[in-house]
């Protein structure tokens, strides 16, 4: 099945990224250790690939992030690191073997106007409330932008140096003398303000976040009153079995761009169409065997065609 090439316009854009657990299992169910490991992996990836992080939210079976990538290569490297290391560390914690994620990460460009960026931040802050799990965004017991941003402090996580730990255990005479704790490093995840709100002071930014969170709380309370229901609650969330396999929710097709207005959506779709047209034309020529084909900037060229042998056998 063909896939659309990942596209991040130059010189960079905000991107909404999602990752989902295999079979919608609750492998990311919050706990103090899980939260620290997720934050540690994000902080290590941020330091390694210099990615701006605006807001993360990890529920029990999926995570969303608002990030800034300069191009598709930086996006691919960052997400490969994040996906692989969260799967390794959290999977190890739960004794989970085999596939951890449902598939590759999903990413969608967010238009660079204020309405579009705030719309996606609001969607991310609603995580946990819109699913009927907690009454307030900041009540979610896992990694969540609401509690992080309202605290006005960058969160800290734990990065485990598995390579160093493995090498130490391999050294002769170290059996029983190696403490895994000695190979853990506390790292800070640095959150950036939305580009559209970079001009605000720290206090003004906090007030904007507080207003959105308050609106979400009121909307959630009104919905529960209308439905005569109540949220599941923090305690019940924390008691859930990480291996539990719920009915998988139906996922609709991803939009090509998150935009608050038709005009912004049109502009981004036109730019994407130009990119895809150039990419597919170059790909067709490249796969036919043509050499020196120029691909549009910011893409991964496809694998080349099979090269048939000419002349006598080499052996």
Image (tube, rainbow, N blue to C red):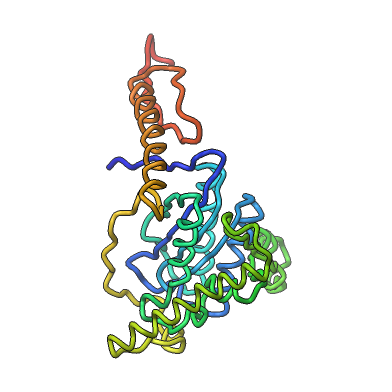
| Callout count | 0
- 105 relative to 209, above or below: above
Q: Nearer the viewer, residue 111 or 53?
A: 111
- Compared to residue 51, the image places residue 145 above or below, namely below
Name the quadrant containing residue 164. bottom right
Q: Is residue 122 above or below residue 83?
A: below
Percent x, y for residue 114? 51, 56
From this viewpoint, which residue is outermost toward the top? 311
For the C terminus, give its image quadrant: top left
Q: Position of residue 101 (x, y in %)?
A: 40, 61
Question: Would residue 173 appear left or right of 15 to someone viewing this image?
Answer: right
**x, y (%) of residue 79?**
51, 53
Q: Specify the quadrant of the image occupied by residue 237.
A: bottom left
Left of 126 or right of it: where is 138?
right
Q: Is residue 262 left or right of residue 196?
A: left
Rendered-image quadrant of the N terminus: top left
The residue positioned 30% from the left and 75% from the top of the image is 246
Q: Nearer the viewer, residue 1 or 296?
A: 296
Work out whether residue 55 or residue 118 is closer to the camera in this orientation and state it.
Answer: 118
In the foreground, 200 or 314 = 200
Picture coordinates of residue 228 (x, y %)?
A: 29, 90
Residue located 43% across and 52% down the image:
107
- Using residue 25 as the reference point, say whether residue 48 is left or right of it: right
At a point 62% along the width and 56% down the height, the residue shown is 46
Does residue 149 appear in this view? yes
Regarding residue 34, the answer to whether it shows in the image is no
Q: Residue at x 40, y 70 (%)?
A: 61
């Amino acid at each position: 099945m063909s896939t659309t090439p990942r596209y991040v316009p130059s010189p960079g854009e905000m991107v909404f990224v999602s990752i989902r657990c295999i079979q919608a299992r609750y492998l990311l169910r919050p706990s103090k250790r899980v939260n620290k490991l997720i934050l540690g992996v994000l902080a290590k990836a941020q330091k390694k690939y210099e990615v701006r992080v605006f807001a993360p939210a990890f529920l029990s079976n999926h995570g969303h992030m608002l990030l800034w990538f300069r191009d598709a290569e930086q996006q691919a490297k960052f997400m490969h690191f994040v996906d692989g290391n969260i799967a390794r560390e959290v999977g190890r914690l739960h004794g989970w073997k085999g596939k951890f994620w449902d598939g590759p990460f999903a990413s969608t460009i967010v238009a660079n106007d204020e309405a579009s960026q705030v719309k996606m931040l609001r969607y991310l802050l609603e995580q946990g409330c819109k699913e009927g799990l907690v009454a307030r965004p900041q009540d979610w017991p896992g990694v969540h932008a609401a509690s992080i941003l309202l605290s006005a402090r960058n969160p800290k996580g734990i990065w485990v140096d598995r390579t160093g730990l493995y090498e130490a255990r391999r050294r002769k005479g170290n059996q029983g003398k190696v403490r895994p704790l000695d190979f853990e490093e506390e790292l800070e995840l640095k959150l950036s303000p939305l580009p559209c709100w970079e001009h605000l002071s720290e206090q003004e930014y906090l007030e904007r976040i507080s207003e959105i969170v308050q609106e979400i709380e009121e909307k959630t309370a009104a919905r529960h009153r209308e439905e005569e229901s109540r949220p599941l609650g923090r305690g019940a969330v924390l008691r859930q079995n990480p291996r539990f396999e719920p009915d998988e929710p139906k996922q609709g097709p991803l939009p090509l761009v998150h935009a608050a207005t038709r005009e912004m959506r049109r502009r981004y779709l036109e730019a994407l169409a130009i990119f895809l047209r150039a990419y597919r034309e170059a790909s067709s020529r490249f796969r036919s065997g043509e050499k020196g084909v120029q691909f549009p900037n910011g893409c991964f060229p496809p694998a080349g065609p099979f090269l048939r042998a000419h002349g006598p056998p080499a052996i």
